[in-house]
Amino acid sequence: MKTLVLATNNKHKLREFKEMLEPIGYEVKTLKDFGITIDPEENGTTYGENAYIKCKAARALVDHPVISDDSGIEILGLNRFPGIHSSRYVDSECNGSYEEAFVDINKKLGNNPDRRAEYHCAICLLENLEDEPKIFEGVCPGYLLMEPNGIGGFGYDPLFHCTESDQDFGIATEDEKNAVSHRKKALVKLMEYLNNK
Ligand code: IMP
């Protein structure tokens, strides 16, 4: 089995990556398995650049190919805000509270009828430190509800309605969300690439 190191300690992501990649011959490890912690400054201008920054920092410390992902939500009526700043916006402007963020977003949108939103994800694969990074992207389109529904998923999910599955992500099961999610779509592309190597 070939080893891939996932540059995150998010358990949900780890499970999703393992489920997809182990059946095609890849053992997925995390930096924790190597006793390593990284916290590089994610100062890229795209999801792909930020995913590459994480991969590079990790690949310098482990002797295996590394994968990482970066994601966010883009609200079309707010010129795609918060985008790559999705996590930072909640931490720095909403006291780390998504409830506060939902109120703030609704205030920002006001009477704007365009409530379309998209989740974006980029997965980076860096086999060797000096390689060009390979980037795989996925998008999950939907719109923002007028108020949160449910407590499922994480982050912005309670406010998000997915048009593809016609479901509110706050009440969808993990499997239902994973069938259509931005991360899953990017992951399928990574898997296709690895399968054809
Ligand atoms: P990261 O890529 O794990 O740093 O995630 C960036 C941020 O985007 C998260 O902290 C969430 O705020 C938001 N986000 C990304 N993907 C999702 C998702 O599937 N559901 C809800 N929020 C998400």
Image (cartoon, grey):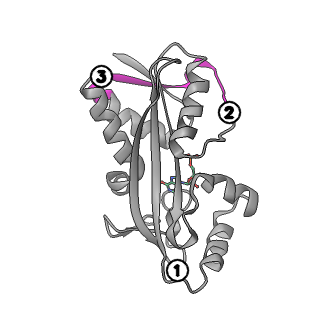
Q: Is mark 2 within 8 Å of ligand 1?
A: no
Residue designated by label 2: 40
Residue 147 counted in the magenta span:
no
Q: Earlier in the sequence, mark 3 or mark 2?
A: 3
**What residue is at 52 percent from the left and 69 percent from the top?**
159
Residue 95, relative to residue 14: is it above or below? below
Quadrant housing the N terminus? top left
Q: Which residues are magenta?
A: 22-40
Q: Considering only order in the chain, which callout, 1 or 2, is on the residue closer to the N terminus?
A: 2
Residue 35 visible to the viewer: yes
How far across and down, in percent of the image, does residue 100 sit? 68, 69
**Residue, far top:** 63
**CA separation in Å, label 3 and label 2:** 29 Å
Say if 113 sits above or below 184 in the image. below
Give amino acid for label 1: Met
Q: Which amino acid is tagged 3?
A: Gly
Q: What residue sits 45% from the left and 38% below the top?
A: 123
Name the residue tied to disc 3: 25
Query: Horizontal and vertical percent for residue 156?
Result: 54, 62
Q: Nearer the viewer, mark 3 or mark 2?
A: 2
Q: How far apart, in angstroms, are the residues tagged by discs 2 and 1?
A: 36 Å
Residue 173 visible at all: no
Q: Which residue is mark 1?
A: 146
Nearer to us in this view, 131 or 67? 131
Instruction: Find residue 17 and report its horizontal and vertical position in percent.
Output: 40, 36
Residue 31 tag number:
none
Query: Does residue 128 appear to the left or right of 188 in the view shown?
Result: right
Instruction: Identify the element where label 3 is drawn.
Output: loop
Residue at the left extreme, as displayed: 196
Q: Position of residue 2 (x, y in %)?
A: 36, 16
Give the residue type that dot 2 points to.
Pro
Residue depth check, mark 2 versus mark 1: number of the one nearer the observer: 2
